Each structure stands twice: as C-alpha cells, then as structure tokens.
C-alpha cells in the first residue's frame, strides 16, 4: 500500500506534487493547507486524511481536526501539524501508533524514535528560506513501513 504524504502547501499545489501522488491508496496532509481548493484536488486523487495547521483559518478550516488517527494497511498513523503539540495532548495509551506524520517546520525528516516512525514530508508549497520543496510516501507491506522523502524542485 502506498500512502502519499504532503504538508505545508500554503495554497500552492504544484504539478510535480500532483504527479507524485498519483496512484496513492491514501493521502495524509500534515496541515497548513491554505484553502479548500487544495483538499478538493487531493481528494480527487485518493481518500484524504488532513489536519489543521496554524495558518489554516476561516470557515473552511474550522471543522478540521488538530490531530487525526487513521489505520492504513494495518498500521496506525497519527497526523498532527506541529510535533511540539503532541506532548500536550491527552492521548489514550490504547491509541498506540506506528507512525506520526507532521508538518510545520518545512524541514523533511524521517526518524524512528522508541519504535515510532516520525516523518515530516517537508513543504510542498512556496519555498521558505533555502529549504527544499519536498513530499513523501509510506509504503506499507505486511505491517512494515518504508518511508521515502522526495525533493520536487
């Protein structure tokens, strides 16, 4: 199963990002979406799990959750925009996750800590500082997770 990961689009959905996400079974957006048109375009490709980022404001964003957990390919994945908020949440210990997808920093990262994969696909939207424009994916096979981050431009 191929899960597309995207974050920090800030209203810009690049053609390279759309091309990369084609064929995904599911897409997770780590927040700072930038407008409902982004959600419409992504949900036309695959089912979508999305969380609200600190820049997602207005009526269109008010109903978006701050954190969301989804089970895909037998793997429990939590999405949250800012990892710093994860420690502040009162999470049910029974809700153990194998992966956490985030955004906010615009810095791509894939790191395993205490048996949990933390992955930030970076920013697929407007360039910030000298950080890359990037996107990611999770390949799930037999309960094993293989992360990949790809620089787009």
Image: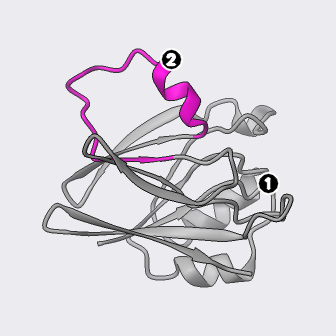
Q: Is residue 127 or residue 4 the one in the foreground? A: 127
**Image quadrant where one finds the N terminus:** bottom left
**Image quadrant where one finds the C terminus:** bottom right
Classify mark 1: residues with Cα within 10 Å, few (<14), some (14-19) or many (20+): some
- 51 to the left or right of 127: left
- 5 to the left or right of 61: left
Label located before the other in sequence (2 or 1): 1
Q: Which segment did they paint magenta?
A: 81-101
Q: Is residue 11 or residue 117 the one in the foreground? A: 117
Residue placed at 26% from the left, 30% from the top? 95
Residue placed at 50% from the left, 33% from the top? 67
Residue placed at 68% from the left, 83% from the top? 16
Kindly indicate the quadrant of the structure image that contains residue 6.
Answer: bottom right
Do residues under tags 2 and 1 come within 8 Å of each other at their CB atoms?
no
Tell me if residue 121 comes above or below residue 59 in the rendering.
below
Q: Secondary structure at mark 1?
A: loop
Residue placed at 68% from the left, 39% from the top? 53
Kindly indicate the quadrant of the structure image that contains residue 74.
Answer: bottom left
Tell me if residue 1 comes above or below residue 64 in the rendering.
below
Q: Which residue was labeled with disc 1?
A: 10
- 94 to the left or right of 77: left
Q: Secondary structure at mark 2?
A: helix
- 61 to the left or right of 126: left
Magenta stretch holds residue 10: no
Estimate the x, y position of residue 87 in percent, counting from the top left: 47, 22
Estimate the x, y position of residue 130 in percent, counting from the top left: 83, 65
Q: Which residue was labeled with disc 2?
A: 88
Q: Is residue 126 or residue 107 the one in the foreground? A: 107
Q: Is residue 141 or residue 64 the one in the foreground? A: 141
């Amino acid at each position: 199963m191929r899960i597309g990961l995207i974050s920090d689009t800030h209203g810009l959905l690049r053609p390279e990002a759309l091309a990369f996400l084609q064929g995904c079974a599911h897409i997770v957006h780590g927040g700072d979406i930038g407008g409902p048109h982004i959600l419409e375009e992504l949900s036309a490709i695959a089912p979508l799990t999305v969380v609200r980022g600190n820049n997602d404001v207005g009526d269109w964003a008010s109903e978006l959750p701050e954190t969301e957990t989804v089970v895909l390919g037998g793997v429990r994945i939590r999405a949250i925009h800012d990892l710093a908020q994860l420690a502040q949440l009162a999470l049910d210990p029974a809700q153990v996750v194998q992966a956490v997808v985030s955004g906010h920093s615009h810095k791509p990262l894939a790191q395993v800590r205490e048996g949990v994969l933390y992955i930030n696909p970076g920013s697929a939207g407007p360039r910030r500082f000298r950080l890359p424009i990037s996107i990611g994916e999770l390949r799930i096979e037999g309960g094993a997770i293989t992360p990949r981050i790809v620089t787009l431009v």
